[in-house]
Image (cartoon, rainbow, N blue to C red):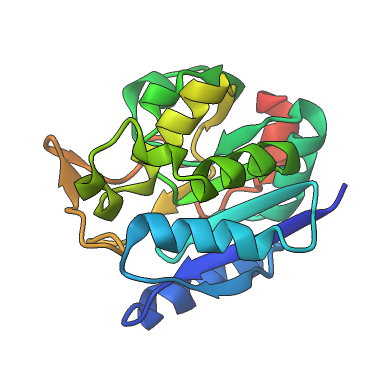
Amino acid sequence: MKIKFGLLTIAGREKYYVDTLESLSKSGIEPERIDGTMIPIQSHFLAWKKLFREMPDYVVKFEDDIVTGLGLGDTIRQILKDVKPSFLTLYSNRAKIINHDPGVFEFHSNDFLHEQGVAMSWITYLQYVDWMENLRFMKPHKESNYNKCHDVILRSFFKEYNIKTFATSPSLIQHIGIESAHGHPWKIAGIPRQSRNFIGESTNIYKYYMEHMR
């Protein structure tokens, strides 16, 4: 299985980027740097296109404000081999996900909120890029939403194509940025944009996955 890892960043966030890169490197991941733009939808879309240019089976895309534990690279490879998800998120602060028993499980895409660390399959990407390039993503949204969150667009895509989305519990990465890359606040509806069930930086994630999540 061919897997491509990428790390999306934008100008002015070098400190976050360096910390994230160091954490990923310790976990066995050396991602390609992707320099994005200040327009969220454009930034994420271009990142997916660049990372899929060599037609890997999966792309795993991280944002520049996360930390993780040990062995995340091997864990992701094992999860993708075991579950073969169309789309997988490695992080969430949503109650329905963090209160779930340890494992990798299907969840409703309406509960998807963050893109700090996600994986997409090649087949899903082909549908996604066609949907985006033909501007069908504009139909369920007003044009003003073009400047808003990319996850809003993804939810509509998942719904239209009936794509199953998966999550991990506990979260395998943690959001460290006080403010997101595109200026979104630290709290949403009073809830900090951090996972309350992060597995921990000192945890051997692969061992935990094999013993408790598989």
The answer, for residue 67, to whether it is visible in the render is: no
Q: Nearer the viewer, residue 72 or 211?
A: 72
Based on the displayed image, in which of its 4 quarters is residue 39 positioned? Answer: bottom left
Where does residue 82 sit, x and y in percent of width and height? 80, 29
Q: Nearer the viewer, residue 182 or 187?
A: 182
Left of 153 or right of it: where is 210? right
Where does residue 141 sit, x and y in percent of width and height? 28, 36
Q: Nearer the viewer, residue 119 or 37?
A: 37
The outermost residue toward the right is 1
Where does residue 85 sit, x and y in percent of width and height? 69, 30
At x 47%, y 79%, the residue is 18
Q: Is residue 14 above or below residue 129?
A: below
Q: How many marks?
A: 0
Based on the displayed image, in which of its 4 quarters is residue 206 positioned? Answer: top right
At x 73%, y 59%, the residue is 4
The outermost residue toward the left is 190
At x 27%, y 62%, the residue is 182
Q: Is residue 75 above or below residue 37?
A: above
Left of 80 or right of it: where is 186? left
Q: Is residue 62 above or below residue 36?
A: above
Q: Nearer the viewer, residue 9 or 209?
A: 9
Image quadrant occupied by the C terminus: top right
The outermost residue toward the front is 134
At x 23%, y 61%, the residue is 178
The answer, for residue 213, to whether it is visible in the render is: yes
Where does residue 100 sit, x and y in percent of width and height? 47, 18
